[in-house]
Amino acid sequence: MVCIMIIAILIYTAAGLNISQPLTLTTNTSDVVLHCPFSLPANTEEFKAVLHRNYSQGSFICGSTFNITSKVTSPHNGSQCIVTADNTTLSFFLSNLTPKDTAVYECIIEVMYPPPYQKKYGNGTLIDVNGVPPSPVPCVPNDISWIYLAVILVLGIYGIFMTGLMIICWKKGKVNGYGQADYMNMTPRRPINQKYHPYAPQPRTYPKYC
């Protein structure tokens, strides 16, 4: 009789533990949330939620222990995962995913207290991480090219300024007659009816005062 009661209790408590999850989940970003609905036996006070990649024989991703009566959570989170739970759903927040992280992720729930210990596996979700577009990299101009451009611009402006200044000065000089030789076309005065030698002393044509 006692054995029958124990078996009935085990069947009742085991029937209350269940977990499910979607078959596939596709994302085009590096962050995704995997929701796993679950149910617990009525007398559960503490349970544990775990996420594995490539089923339980694969790598541990993250997990947490939840105490229903004291509302205390003991996280065992990985660097890419955080798990939360409400009354009916486990939520695994995965971040920094790449196409290499495409795999089957399995939700696991365990009843820790009261005894007997129970464990239930989800059916696994294939998370398909498509190509995540890289973050745009701002175009950083080359400092050396900017220096060259500035030098060329300054030299060009200087050349235009100097050319204009020279043109203005040339026009002013032309109007004022600068640069003309006053004595350019004058020839030396020769004595009338006298034999003239270019190297001979010239006679005086003005009175001598001293």
Image (cartoon, rainbow, N blue to C red):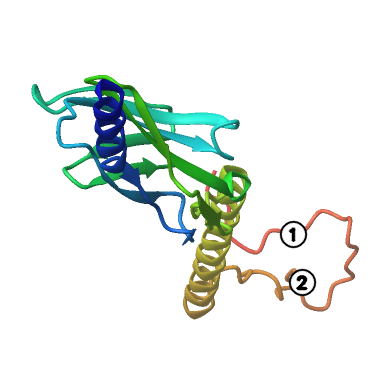
Between 182 and 170, the residue placed more toward the observer is 170
Say the numbered circle drawn on residue 17.
Answer: none
Instruction: Answer with left or right where residue 17 lies relative to residue 88.
Output: right
Gap in angstroms between the C-alphas marked 1 and 2: 8 Å
Q: Residue 39, position in %: x, y?
A: 25, 44
Say the numbered circle drawn on residue 203.
Answer: 1
Q: Residue 31, position in %: x, y?
A: 41, 49
Residue 98 appears in the picture as rendered: no
Instruction: Answer with left or right where residue 80 lies relative to residue 199.
Output: left
Task: Please name the residue shown 52% across and 62% down the image.
Answer: 157
Q: Secondary structure at mark 2?
A: loop
Say which label, 1 or 2, has the lower sequence index: 2
Task: Please name the residue shown 30% across and 31% down the image.
Answer: 10
The C terminus - image quarter: top right
Asked whether the beta carbons under mark 1 and mark 2 sit within 8 Å of each other, the answer is: yes
Look at label 2 and name its amino acid. Pro
Q: Secondary structure at mark 1?
A: loop
